[in-house]
Image: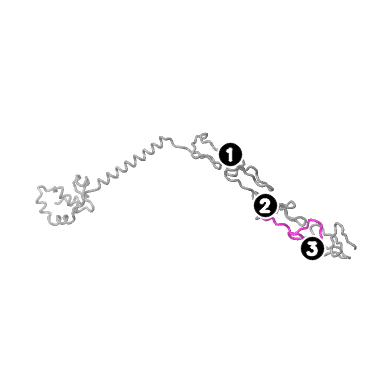
Amino acid sequence: MYICTCARAEYEINGECCPMCTPGSRVFRHCTEFTSTTCKQCVGLTYTDEPNGLANCIICMVCDSGQGLRIKTACTRTSDTVCEPLEGFYCTDEYSGSCRYAVEHTKCSPGQYIKQKGTALKDAECGECSDGTYSNGSLLVCKPHSTCEDFGLTKIKPGTNSLDTECGKTLPVAVITGALLGITTVVAVAGALFFFIKRCCTCPPRADSAEKMDFHTNIHEKDYMKTTKKSSPTLRREDRVVLCALNHTGHVASPDKNDCEKQPCDPQEHEFTHWT
């Protein structure tokens, strides 16, 4: 039995050894007993990277950002795309010098520092902050807590492994005491003033309306003037109170400042009691 063995740069098809196509091309028509192989260049995002007897070029790899990849070297007719991890990612599946899948670097938590930065091939490593130091997770080294006294400040809140000490200014005790005393004094004065005003502005209850109307109806001006000894009227306190009540809504007042808690009548009331 005769076995045909083709040369290194040939491929076998239908019992014939045909010459291979060069990289960047493919077989368009196989050879025959009388003709050689017909080749055609790869087009679009396709390639062949070695001599071949392929009927179709190979489709270039796509660097998918959803898989943590980006293009490192673009595809050509003679080479495939080379992908690499995105910034902050590292490759977990590599083939022929190109990454096929990558994941994001581990992010250190607050209270940890970045012990080892991640690379395109290796994940990041985190370390724990020791007592008296802190990190928000993005530091390469944990920082010591601030000493407030060094800045002339007072410690407001102690530091943790993720936060620095909180410092601030404090008011002197004398200032705080003075402020509290001032507030207390203002409140006391305001209360006393309110009580005084309320008492001064509150007159005796109003006289009965029926009595006021009877007095006004039954006493005629001339008869009343005859009962007085002077041309200038001098009313008794009870009379003035009733007269004031007739001309004042809500409170009783009198022309005399000694009546109704030292509150004089208004001008209309004053005119009412001074008849001619």
Name the residue carrying label 3.
Answer: 55
Residue 85 at x, y = what percent?
68, 51
Type of amino acid at the residue the image marks with label 3: Ala
Query: Which residues lie in the magenta part?
Result: 43-65
Measure the C-alpha gap from mark 2 to mark 1. Answer: 32 Å
Query: According to the image, what is the colour scheme of the structure?
Result: one colour
Horizontal side of 139 relative to 276 (left or right) equals right
Q: Is residue 39 above or below residue 239?
A: below
What crowding class fits label 3: few (fewer than 14 Cα within 10 Å), some (14-19), or many (20 or more)?
some
Residue at the spot of label 1? 130
Q: Amino acid at mark 1?
A: Ser
Q: Tell me the SS state at disc 2.
A: strand
| Residue type pointed to by label 2 | Ala
10 Å crowding of disc 1: few (<14), some (14-19), many (20+):
few
Closer to the camera: disc 2 or disc 1?
Answer: 1
Disc assigned to residue 102: 2
- How would you rate the neighbour count of disc 2 (Cα within 10 Å): few for under 14, some for 14-19, many for 20 or more? many
Overall secondary structure of the magenta stretch? loop
Q: Earlier in the sequence, mark 2 or mark 3?
A: 3
Q: Is residue 218 left or right of residue 104?
A: left
- Quarter-wise, where is residue 144 in the image? top right
Is 270 located above or below residue 134 in the figure? Answer: below
Residue 250 lies, in percent from the top left, at 23, 53
Relative placement, left or right, of 61 versus 128 is: right
What residue appears at the point 22 percent right and 51 percent down from the top-left corner? 251
